[in-house]
Image (spheres, coloured by chain):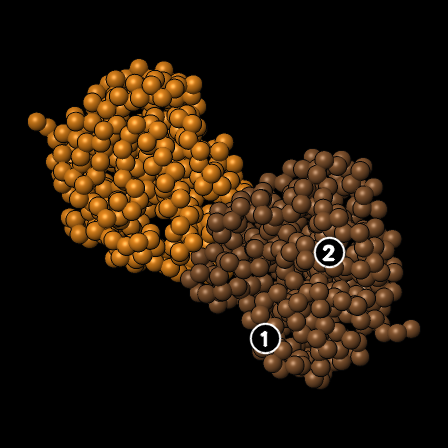
Chain colours: A orange, B brown
Amino acid sequence: MDKSKYAVLGAGNGGQCISAYLSLKGYEVSLYDRFKNIINPLKERGNIELKGVSLNGIAQIDCITTDIEEAVDGKDIILVVVPAYAHEYIADMLSPILKSGQAVVLCPGSTGGVLEFKRVLREKNCSAHIKIAETSSLFYACRTEAPGVAIIGGIKKELPLAALPSSDAKEIIELLKEPYPQLIEEENVLVSDMSNMNAVIHPLPVLLNTGWIEATKGNFKFYYDSITPSIGKMVEKLDAERIEICKALGIEVKSFKESMYFYYGAQGDSIGEMVRKVDAYKIVSAPSKIETRLIAEDVPMGLVPMAELAKLVGVKTPMMNITIELASILLGIDFRATGRTLDKLGIEGMDKESLLNYIK
Amino acid sequence: MDKSKYAVLGAGNGGQCISAYLSLKGYEVSLYDRFKNIINPLKERGNIELKGVSLNGIAQIDCITTDIEEAVDGKDIILVVVPAYAHEYIADMLSPILKSGQAVVLCPGSTGGVLEFKRVLREKNCSAHIKIAETSSLFYACRTEAPGVAIIGGIKKELPLAALPSSDAKEIIELLKEPYPQLIEEENVLVSDMSNMNAVIHPLPVLLNTGWIEATKGNFKFYYDSITPSIGKMVEKLDAERIEICKALGIEVKSFKESMYFYYGAQGDSIGEMVRKVDAYKIVSAPSKIETRLIAEDVPMGLVPMAELAKLVGVKTPMMNITIELASILLGIDFRATGRTLDKLGIEGMDKESLLNYIK
């Protein structure tokens, strides 16, 4: 069997690491970003140096481009490694050029990535038979030292992937098995969407540290310093609402605390205590300003679709609502409107039964 | 004319300063507090030492007591110097023992102090003909070094006082003129209530610095450090809602910025910039925890009655509402329920006309 060909869409930290890794693994890889200021320095280098705990070496990327059509043409697998708020744009750009047989994987999907993607393809009358999936987070903890110098700091040992229809997950995991053996099958996209832990742990600690962030330009540790007792309690309330929604949907997800124990072996009475037991969190700084992806991505692409799903099943989410409102007022963006509503997810008007049927 | 006799109810910083000052001025003064742990150390001393920018000396307080009846018996003027959330309790205790001719002044009334006080007296069928008023803040910036050692750091040069009916203000100011010449007549209690600047500037900067406060036990300057650009903008939005309510009520109050200029000569584009021009604010530390009067008093006795008045005149107050909700969730207290509702203010069911008629 020929080796799969990859398009990596998005040339930030994640996209640079993934394209370099795949390239060093011997795959044909194209790397795309819509922004010239990101692509040009990489194009000039012509390669990406990969360091860290995974492969090390200079990766010759076959194609580095701002032309999405050039990037995806003839590729088997399209990995979308952009902030979730750019998924709609990518879906929009891809819909006329996708070819039957291609697989698209959102890395990660945040909450509702695949649902939104499918809605756009449907609206644009995309006739290609593609497979589409989302992971629940990125493959790596990674960063870039400079444009074209990428570092993989840690590799997730298990990474759930969910497809729509859910039965497609097996085939996509099989396709990706050689470079990414850590992928495991998630029940369906709803489970994946409702397991978005970033939405649980990011927004509240930023919002309730607005002054500290602005006064010090984020000169403190995000997890270690800012998840104080009251903030930890708020996060727990938010998480309890997430669990309630899942119960009403009839799906099972880990609580934040369970996942902290599951992924990191962290134990403790409070969320603050648990996060301070995770070594990897020790080095994570607070954002330098409140205009951060921890809000701008995790509220509209995390909490908003969760709160929307809550409405669909009649669960009250006062903590999610106040977090969304506060973020909207503070950043001057109406995240309820810009975020993933049921309408944008393509599931407006469905009841629980038809939704569960749709995501089967 | 005989010198007036004073009862000072509340023996915190304010009550200790006021009773010592009045005593040094030669008035007969009783000092009351309901808490033995506050009264006993003062009783043991038998006096209060007053320092600072006002009078200096050892004040022999005529009566220091936890018996409110003993405190107010035979007094002409009753100064109520307790947190606003204790006004209802004081009104309740006073209603059976007040005598016609006595004057009660809430120092200060926060938002709705006099309205609430009157409602309680009415409910308790208090038949004494008393005069009742509220100031818009305390007479002094003051603190205590130790029980019985009180320091007046600054004296307000002008202090509005409003009465109900408003025509009583003149007479009460006349009564208090000798010790407190700075009192000026406020149009009515609504103007006084809606001029509660603590409600504007206290809650949001605490709430949006929850993490910083808990992580450092408030080891930063409240006004100087924590009114960052985003928080300043939020405070301005809140203030704009307050002004909208006043417009709808047909009353005129200063905006927070106008009052900063009026009282301190502070100028600047943003609220953060202005507060940093006030020397007196330089030394004000952040609270050591979020369970602070800056929330527990200024939300239920400030923002809640403001938001209630907004409902009465049909003004939308999203910023006030989210501040009240956030405070309620963070402190685990339903401030909408514990705070000064229209019902507690005794004005439930009134329309604008009947309200304006009532507070005439």
Residue A119 percent across, percent down from the top left = 37, 22
Q: Is residue B122 above or below residue B263?
A: above
Name the quadrant containing residue B84: bottom right
The residue at the point 52 percent across, 36 percent down is A334
**Quadrant housing the C terminus of chain A:** top left
Q: How many marks?
A: 2
Q: Are marks 2 and 1 in contact (CB under 8 Å)?
A: no
In the rendered image, which residue does mark 1 sit on? B40
Give whichever of A316, A81 is nearer the camera.
A316
Give whichever of A336, A23 is nearer the camera.
A336
Name the quadrant containing residue B100: bottom right
Q: Residue furthest left?
A: A1
Relative to residue A299, is residue B305 drawn left or right? right
Q: Is residue A202 above or below residue A317?
A: below
Give whichever of B178, B246 is nearer the camera.
B178
The residue at the point 84 percent across, 52 percent down is B166
Whichever of labels 2 and 1 marks the residue nearer the N terminus, that label is 1
Residue B114 percent across, percent down from the top left = 74, 53
The residue at the point 73 percent across, 56 percent down is B96
Q: Is residue A98 above or below residue B337?
A: above
Relative to residue B265, is residue A26 drawn left or right? left
What is the secondary structure assignment of the residue under circle 2? loop
In the rendered image, which residue does mark 2 sit on? B96
Viewer-side label of 2, 1:
2
Mark 2 neighbour class, 10 Å CA radius: few under 14, some 14 to 19, many 20 or more: some
Task: Kindly identify the amino acid type of the residue bearing the numbered disc 1.
Answer: Asn
Residue A216 percent across, percent down from the top left = 46, 61
